[in-house]
Amino acid sequence: MQLDQPQQVITALQAFLTTPLDDFLKQHTAADPESAALTLFHHVAATVPAYQMFLKQHEIDPAAIQTFADFQRLPLSTKANYIQRYSLAQLCPQGHLETCDMIAVSSGSTGNPTFWPRSVTDEFQIALRFEQIFRDSFQADRHRTLAVVCFPLGTWVGGMYTASCCRHLASKGYPIMVVTPGNHKPEIFRVIQALSPAFEQVVLLGYPPFLKDVIDSGIAQGVSWPQYNLKLVMAGEVFSEEWRSLVGERVGSTQVCYDSASLYGTADAGVLGNETPLSICIRRWLAEHPDTARELFGESRLPTLVQYDPMSRFFEVQGDGTLLFSGDNGIPLVRYHISDNGGLIPYATMLQTLQDCGFDPVRALSTMSVPQNHHAIHPLPFVYIFGRSHFVVSYFGANLYPENVSVGLEQASICNWVTGKFVMQVKVDADQNPFLSVVVELAPGVEGGEEKQQAIANSIRRQLQRLNSEFANYVPAQYQMPQITLTATGDPDYFPLGVKHYYTRAE
């Protein structure tokens, strides 16, 4: 028996249940995150056997790390050089795996499983990210809410973690009821239709393409989504603001900055940041001003843009534009590198930059704000995430991104024909001339044809020209029109059912 474990859980639970969200965020914005990161390092160096061996391997004396500049010189930890080199017990504080009570599994790009133990106390700080969304966006503190978990259930992190965090909010007093049909569409429809009359709003939580499939399938079956006052919580993929508008229109959304939110999460450390009404308002404006977005983010694609709590997850940016984070978990992580491309923008810097461009997002948000909602804006820093660099196709020296193509498929004249899935790659013809190939999955029951192929090609080309200056300037005009192949839903070569979809293939 671990006799001190109950008291640790009680202390963490009491702090979560009795401290209002605003107080947490005010305390954290007033604190010094660099000092906190240094404190975390010394705690991990003193208590985690694997990190002690890791530091010894790199000939680092923890006592010599006294300033934040010292901290920034610490070696990066990765899945390969740290997580996979030591046992699960060695990666946990005091070398005791039993201090954790649950394990999530991630497979990554190699397909080999990685195990991530965590304790219930780890979930409380992640539940704050859900609380931000449910309270600030959905006003779930004063509306009876049915939370429908549509992430796959099992050993994967999304479903079980989400269900746990939503239940913690209910324990805190939010009028939230959780139901877990997972990614089984008939069960999702069944529980919504049976339970929704007892609630004022329904929240679907899942991966964006799957939620769109649920919504579209429901419409095909005669489901009237607006009657449910539907909200969406998403994770796992970058999506465009056209996608948000399209899905919002289909479910009857009336407050686009408040009716959905995306989480930036990993199996490694739970939720690292979350969209807020403010970040969504900013992102939607940048989607209409691609030149400003390109200057701000440095690329011709719109990243995920979230706010984060640096006292919970401390971010840094490498010189190559990849993100690092440090945070306390079942496996504490210090300067952990997961190869996500992105960057950081302080709150004041973001607002001043946009105001210099003639846009005041705080004022803009106030004009569309939900009545009586005074919680939505917190002075938290922003992190933007493009994802992994290997999801890029190079064409005539131009970097083409799936996000650019997605917008072309989300135009009003196109979106009803397709599921949103596609595979982009560069091929060569018989004369070895390159061309841009885009294989597109048709929606169920939709027939292909030359007219649809041409309309889709034109739409994708227009959006690439608008959003991607490299494409517009590097690719000769005669090579800019993509060649479109249309396939039925679930095509086994490009869109096999039940496996993770990749939007690019090697040349």
Image (cartoon, grey):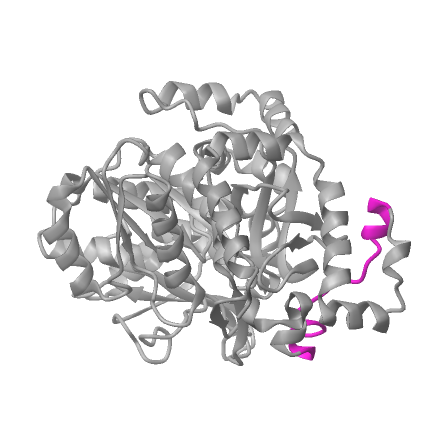
Residue 116 visible to the viewer: yes
Residue at left offset 26%, top offset 70%: 489
Front residue of this view, candidates 31 and 238: 31
The percent position of residue 505, horizontal first and vertical second, equals 50, 72
Residue at left offset 66%, top offset 72%: 95
The percent position of residue 343, horizontal first and vertical second, equals 65, 46
The secondary structure that dominates the magenta segment is loop
Image position of 88 (left or right of 153): right
Image position of 186 (left or right of 237): left
Is residue 106 depicted above or below 344 in this figure?
below
Residue at left offset 84%, top offset 55%: 73
The percent position of residue 302, horizontal first and vertical second, equals 52, 45
Front residue of this view, candidates 371 and 340: 371
The answer to which quarter of the image holds residue 134 is top left
As for residue 397 lying within the magenta part, the answer is: no
The percent position of residue 183, horizontal first and vertical second, equals 28, 65
Is residue 244 depicted above or below 108 in this figure?
above
Q: Which residues fall within the magenta stretch?
A: 67-86
The answer to which quarter of the image holds residue 46 is bottom right
The answer to which quarter of the image holds residue 307 is top right
As for residue 82 lying within the magenta part, the answer is: yes
Count every numbered label the image shows and give the total. Answer: 0
Front residue of this view, candidates 499 and 294: 499
Image position of 337 (left or right of 393): right
Residue 412 visible to the viewer: no
Is residue 134 depicted above or below 488 in this figure?
above
Quarter of the figure that contains the C terminus: bottom right
